[in-house]
């Protein structure tokens, strides 16, 4: 009985987050009330307060479902030896990220954060975007530094600059795709751009 109750509570929480996604996308975060989310989920506002302190807490939980820490994507590759090929680790981790972004939930939530969210109370979308970008850029710089130490990075290319170049390319691709997601596949376009960028950064074959 206790296990079933716990499972039911988890299902209720997920249903509330699903409802929040849909209402936030339609109305925007600032113009959405907890009452509207509860009604959309066919629940009471009390159910929301049982699981979340306030709208900001609910919003953070919604974002958490689609967070993609770079190291987590590397681990998802399932090949520990890939860390010995840091540029390939970057490539495969980014492809994992592209695949996730093409899932409807990932696209919806990122669209909410970028296009449907204003500064409101404890919700600061720009700070959240900066946190995600800084985490990704830091990881890219670390992997480029490892590539440089192994002689895999083009001579004379600073690892910090290489990481920032990748971040700028990926960020531009991401924002273009969110605005025009029906026009192109981020996996297909991203693979082409990423492979081209990495080839330009790669050390030429010796001999």
Image: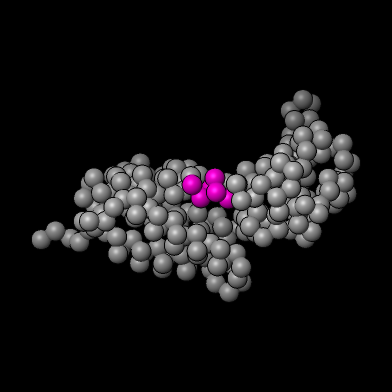
Vertical position of residue 136 compared to residue 168: above or below: above
Q: Looking at the picture, how far across and down is residue 71, in whole percent?
A: 44, 43
Near-viewer residue (6 or 39) = 39
Q: Nearer the viewer, residue 169 or 119?
A: 119
Query: Residue, x 79% and y 26% (percent of image)?
Result: 1
Q: Residue at x 50, y 64 (%)?
A: 173
Q: Residue at x 71, y 58 (%)?
A: 116
Start-end of magenta stretch: 129-134
Give the percent coordinates (x, y) of residue 110: 62, 55
Q: In front here: 77 or 48?
A: 48
122 to the left or right of 27:
left
Query: In the rendered view of the protein, which quadrant contains the C terminus?
Result: bottom left
What colouring style does the render use?
Answer: one colour
Q: Is residue 175 left or right of residue 34?
A: left
Q: Which is the main secondary structure of the residues drawn in magenta?
A: helix
Q: Position of residue 35 (x, y in %)?
A: 87, 46
Q: Could you tell me which residue is drawn at 63 percent across and 57 percent down? A: 114
In the image, residue 122 sits, relative to residue 90, either above or below, namely above
Quadrant of the image occupied by residue 65? top right
Check the image and name the residue furthest to the left: 207
Outermost residue, bottom side:
183
Please state the horizontal and vertical placement of residue 32, each as a whole percent of the image.
81, 52
Judged left or right of residue 14, residue 160 is left
Give whichever of 37, 14 is nearer the camera: 37
């Amino acid at each position: 009985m206790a296990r079933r109750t716990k499972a039911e509570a988890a299902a209720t929480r997920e249903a509330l987050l699903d409802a929040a996604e849909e209402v936030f996308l339609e109305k925007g975060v600032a113009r959405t009330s907890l009452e509207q989310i509860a009604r959309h989920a066919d629940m009471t506002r009390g159910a929301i307060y049982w699981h979340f302190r306030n709208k900001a807490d609910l919003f953070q939980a919604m974002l958490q479902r689609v967070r993609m820490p770079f190291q987590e994507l590397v681990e998802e590759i399932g090949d520990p030896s890939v860390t010995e090929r840091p540029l390939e680790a970057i490539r495969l981790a980014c492809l994992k990220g592209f695949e996730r972004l093409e899932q409807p939930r990932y696209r919806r939530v990122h669209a909410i954060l970028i296009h449907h969210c204003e500064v409101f109370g404890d919700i600061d979308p720009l700070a959240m975007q900066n946190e995600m970008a800084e985490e990704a850029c830091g990881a890219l710089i670390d992997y480029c530094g490892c590539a440089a130490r192994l002689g895999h990075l083009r001579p004379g290319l600073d690892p910090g600059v290489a990481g920032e170049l990748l971040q700028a390319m990926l960020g531009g691709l991401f924002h273009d795709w969110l605005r025009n997601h029906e026009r192109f596949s981020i996996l297909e376009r991203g693979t082409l751009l990423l492979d081209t960028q990495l080839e330009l950064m790669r050390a030429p074959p010796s001999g």
